[in-house]
Amino acid sequence: MAALVASGMSLERFSFYGFIPRKGKERTEAIEEIVGSRSTVVVFEAPSRVGATLEALAQAGAGKRSAVVARELTKQFEEFRRGTVGELASLYSDADPKGEVVLVISAAETPAVSESELTDAARELRASGKRPREVMDHLVGALGAPRNLAYRIAHEG
């Protein structure tokens, strides 16, 4: 909570992910969820993985989003680094921060996507073998569709 409040980002809605998985499909899914999140995201991260996690977020599409790397909260050497996910990924690519680290990432902006664009995207995802639940999650997370509309479109055709 200290990192979230001090970040200056929206407190209206936020998601707490704790430590995201270190590798594999679970990590990829967590990164995709964070990138698609319409709320501020708070993540714990090991100092040795801060650069790699920020880089993964940037490559997944969150590179221009505002972020804060908060370290050593409530301690003598408390520090906050602010910038975009991409800028912070570059900053931490070679130097690991010391101590406990919390990442705070701003919410994704909601793109204006028409229902026909959502239907086209769902059709492509189904053709690639995605299940309705995966289609719905993509429509909501990546394209900003309302959940009930995404559910209907994912289960059509």
Image (tube, rainbow, N blue to C red):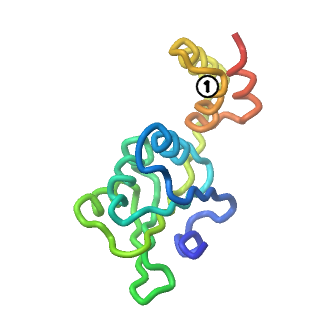
Rendering coords of residue 88 (x, y %): 35, 60
Q: Name the residue under label 1.
A: 135
Residue at 58 percent of width and 34 percent of height: 143
Q: Is residue 145 left or right of residue 19?
A: right
Amino acid type of the residue that numbered disc 1 sits on in the rendered structure:
Val
Residue at 48 percent of width and 45 percent of height: 31
Q: How crowded is mark 1: few (under 14 residues within 10 Å), some or many (20 or more)?
A: many
Residue at 48 percent of width and 67 percent of height: 102
Q: In this view, does 17 lie to the left or right of 22?
A: right
Question: Dividing the picture into quarters, in which one does residue 77 lie?
Answer: bottom left
Q: In this view, does 31 lie to the left or right of 93?
A: right
Quarter of the image where the N terminus is located: bottom right
Q: For this rendering, which residue is in front, 113 or 92?
A: 92
Residue at 54 percent of width and 12 percent of height: 127
Quarter of the image where the C terminus is located: top right
In the rendered image of this protein, does residue 35 appear above or below residue 126? below
Rendering coords of residue 40 (x, y %): 59, 57
Question: Dividing the picture into quarters, in which one does residue 123 lie?
Answer: top right
Rendering coords of residue 25 (x, y %): 47, 37
